Image (tube, rainbow, N blue to C red):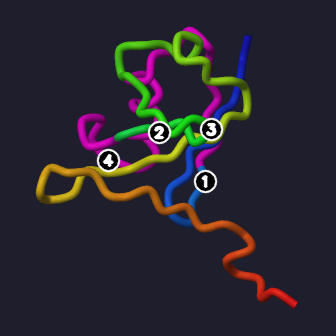
Amino acid sequence: MDMYIRVKRDKTTYFIQCQPTETIEQIKGKLHALTEQPIKDQRLILLETGGILDDAKTLADQKVANDAVVALALRQGDNGFEDVNIVKPEDFMPTL
């Protein structure tokens, strides 16, 4: 059964078509094709729980649902990962 996840980083959202049986490493492979960022330099975080997704486990194993929002963090030069920073629409709109 096809499903989609939304992978967000800064101001960008990637809509990834996938299967619940795909591993996080396979999802990172799809992101590599879009972003040219090596798989080892990607970290995926399920925003609903804040948990880092395990490369060896499937989406279903980690209870990632259809239309889930996942944050993409990239490795920085010091081998640490950048902080998650997702821009929301309300960040652009002034409050009245």
Q: Residue furthest front?
A: 49
Amino acid found under the numbered disc labelled 1:
Thr
Q: Residue at x 43, y 38 (%)?
A: 44
Magenta-drawn stretch contains 28:
yes
Instruction: Verify whether residue 27 appears in magenta.
Output: yes
Highlighted range, magenta: 14-42
Q: Establish if 1 lies above or below 87.
A: above
Assess disc 2: are there few (<14), some (14-19) or many (≥20) residues with their C-alpha within 10 Å of its C-alpha.
many
Q: Amino acid at mark 4?
A: Gln
> Residue at 51% of width from left, 46% of height from top?
71
Kind of residue indicated by mark 3: Glu
- Residue at the image point whose x is 47% and y is 28% from the top: 27
The answer to which of marks 3 and 4 sits earlier in the sequence is: 4
Residue at which label 2 appears: 45
Viewer-nearest of discs 1 and 3: 3
Foreground disc of the pair 2, 1: 2
Residue kind at label 2, given as amino acid type: Ile
The mark nearer the N terminus, 4 or 1, is: 1
Q: CA distance from mark 2 to mark 4?
A: 16 Å
Q: Which residue in the structure is indicated by mark 3? A: 48
- Counting labels gives 4
Q: Which of the two discs, 2 and 1, labels the residue nearer the N terminus?
A: 1
Q: Is residue 59 left or right of residue 31?
A: right
Question: Residue sitting at 34 percent across and 48 percent down?
Answer: 36
The residue labelled by disc 4 is 37
Cβ–Cβ under 8 Å for marks 2 and 1: no
Q: Which residue is mark 1?
A: 13
User: Above or below — where is 29 with respect to 69?
Assistant: above
Residue 15 spot, x, y in % from top left: 64, 42
Q: Position of residue 61 (x, y in %)?
A: 53, 10
